[in-house]
Amino acid sequence: EKGGYEHFMLKEIYEQPNVIKDTYRGRLSSTTGIIKMAGIEDNIEKFLQADRILIVACGTSWHAGLVAEYIIEEFTRIPVEVEYASEFRYRNPIVNQKDVVIAISQSGETADTLAAIKLAKEKGAFVFGVCNVVGSSISRETHAGAYTHAGPEIGVASTKAFTTQITVLTLIALRLAKAKGTLSKSDFFRYLNELELIPDKVQEALQTNDEVEKIAKIIKDTNNSLYLGRGYNFPVALEGALKLKEISYIHAEGYPAAEMKHGPIALIDEHMPVIVIAPKQGHYDKVVSNIQEIKSRSGKIIAVVTKGDTQVKALADHVIEIPETSDALSPLLTTIPLQLLSYHIAVLRGCNVDQPRNLAKSVTVE
Ligand code: F6R
């Protein structure tokens, strides 16, 4: 059942090239520019007339929501807000008929997300679900939706659900951008083509596994760690930190790289591994300055960089090279070595990777 892998988590990490493809296959044609998802087509006016899009989710799905915020705003210029479902449901949020709410959930059973959906519906919003489990409570409770095609996710730590959620949300952003004319034709087609190249590039990113395992051996005994990224990769930093803490029980914090100087920099010394996401596309020069700040305080730098990078390589203690893609799609690649890193560290520490202590696969109680 684990297909020769030692754990479900590793199997699911390695399934990502296929499930990302399964998620966009039949929904997108990069030659004609057609993007087809019934849940979107049937309700496109609701999206186009929305004053804003509100995203509600928990945990890793909330991180996918943050990536989607950056993508949807950039591609469509529709304002997006992302909220923890547990906060949203109890704070008497301002929601009305002109809002579109997107609920993201792998299991489709998360109690807080379900409650947030019910509240948004009561207030008259149109609620759209992005779920993985077909027929789940959230998929039934929402007005419409688009499934991720990740297949069953057994490992408690969410991996392939995250990347397929980002894939669906990217398709939605592209479809809306096409309708609104907010992306130039060339950018629109460039993104479609790049999306189709992602599965092969994820495959390539998976080949960092041996290198990542070596790094895991070096840092496995740390008690603390910091994950930094900017822009599209800030949520990836949060997700990398969540993966590490939940399965290896190492304290990890994710931060926008520039926020480091507003406090966390005080934590940095020669014992602190700092995992920096520094792809070439994006705010590269800014991230390089952040890396210099860490280095001058003797932090141990592990950087995820674009293949062929030289500048970060000269500064970092370890680099993990991934293929190049555009800034907006980079989370689909940068997240891969971070999943592998948390996996190997957890295995080396003798943790129960697939069923970490105190956690359940679907959180049906608040
Ligand atoms: C992290 C993890 C959790 C879930 C969260 C939401 O690896 O698995 O943080 O992401 O409980 O679950 P879903 O997506 O099922 O609503």
Image (cartoon, rainbow, N blue to C red):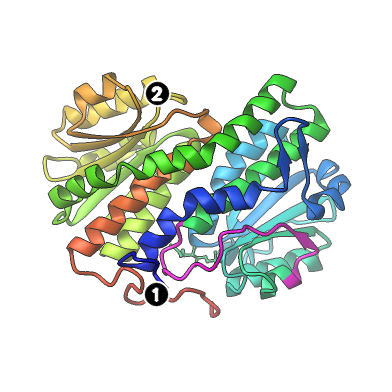
User: At which x and y percent is residue 201?
Assistant: 46, 37
User: At which x and y percent is residue 255?
Assistant: 38, 43
Residue 359: which disc? 1
Label 2, secondary structure: give it: helix
Asked if residue 325 is positioned above or below residue 39 in the image, the reply reads above
| Mark 2 beta carbon near ligand 1 (under 8 Å) | no
Q: Is residue 239 visible?
A: yes
Determine the residue located farthest toward the bottom in the rendered image: 365
- Judge whether residue 148 is colored magenta: yes
Q: Amino acid at mark 1?
A: Leu
The mark nearer the N terminus, 2 or 1, is 2
Classify mark 2: residues with Cα within 10 Å, few (<14), some (14-19) or many (20+): some
* Residue at 28 percent of width and 42 percent of height: 264
Classify mark 1: residues with Cα within 10 Å, few (<14), some (14-19) or many (20+): few
Q: Main secondary structure of the magenta part?
A: loop
Q: Amino acid at mark 2?
A: Tyr
* Residue at 60 percent of width and 74 percent of height: 109
User: At which x and y percent is residue 138?
Assistant: 68, 70
Taking depth in this image into account, of 302 and 299 the one nearest to the observer is 302
Mark 2–mark 1 Cα distance, whole angstroms, equals 36 Å
Residue 284: which disc? 2
The residue segment tinted magenta is 140-159
User: Number of marks in the image?
Assistant: 2
* Residue at 42 percent of width and 69 percent of height: 156
User: At which x and y percent is residue 94?
Assistant: 73, 56
| Mark 1 beta carbon near ligand 1 (under 8 Å) | yes
- Judge whether residue 233 is colored magenta: no
